[in-house]
Amino acid sequence: MPGLLGTYDLGGRMMAPRGVYAPQEDTLMLREALEREAVGPGTEVLDVGTGSGVLALAAARRGARVSAVDRTRRAVLTTRVNAAIAGLKVDVVRGDLLTPAAGRRFDLILSNPPYVPAPDAAPPRRGSARAWDAGHDGRLLVDRLCDGAADLLRPRGAVLLVHSALCGVSATLERLERSGLRAEVTDRRRVPFGPVLSARRKWLAGRGLIAPDDEKEELVIIRADRIR
């Protein structure tokens, strides 16, 4: 695969080529949250924005029937290769967020979507930034996930979502509640700014999203379960 950046040992050897979101703190937080879920043989899992497939493979290792979606061809190929290397079965398709799963029902939906506030209002159409840029408020995809996830859940099904507090924790909780889910923050972690946020420090401060001297952001895991 061209542009290979590295391999990762996350329960098994995995690859993340250039242009595919490599596992970072948000990925690891979501994997830790997944480990607390009652996932096993027969569990139907959907991984939205799978990237290199870390979460999809973690669920598959526990015997779940896993479907994974990403909007980039390279991410889809990467997850398929990583699943093959691991000897795991994951159904990986290319598509727009929840659209490929329309009409199906899942016990668990996982997502580490693009959530970084960006100077451009529209999402990027190409390049690595597709994995993180999500409009001025960072909510272009988060809102769509919140609005559509309930329709894809089985009774007592749940959503596990990770994003930065910069794009609004209360907004996510309220939107999930309006869709008929019971939502709460289960994990919080402060992490140093990476290259993207560091480069946008002045812009973020100008919008009031951070203080000028901030050097860390808070990541949150939000769990929402279907109550009707």
Image (cartoon, rainbow, N blue to C red):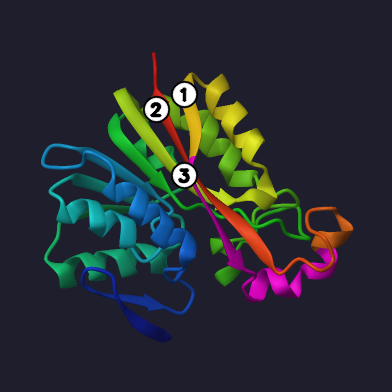
* Kind of residue indicated by mark 3: Leu
- The Cα–Cα distance between marks 3 and 2, rounded to whole angstroms, is 11 Å
Q: Quadrant of residue 175?
A: top right
| Residue toward you, 77 or 87 | 87
Q: Amino acid at mark 2?
A: Asp
Q: Vertical placement of 65 versus 198: above or below?
A: above
Q: Quadrant of the N terminus?
A: bottom left
Q: Which residues are magenta?
A: 186-203
Marks 3 and 2, the one that precedes in the sequence: 3
The numbered dot on residue 182 is 1
Is the C-beta separation of discs 1 and 2 under 8 Å?
yes
Mark number, residue 114: none
Residue, x 25% and y 64% (percent of image)?
Answer: 80
Q: Identify the secondary structure beneath mark 3.
A: strand
**Which is nearer the eye, 43 or 31?**
31
**Which quadrant, please, contains the C terminus?**
top left
Which residue in the structure is indicated by mark 2? 225
Give how far across and how far down residue 74 sits, in percent. 40, 69
Report if residue 225 lies within the magenta region. Answer: no
Can you tell which mark lies on residue 161?
3
* Residue 200 appears left or right of 17: right
Nearest to N terminus: mark 1 or mark 3: 3
Q: Position of residue 88 (x, y in %)?
A: 14, 60
- For numbered disc 2, what is the local secondary structure? strand
Question: In the rendered image, is residue 138 in sight?
Answer: no
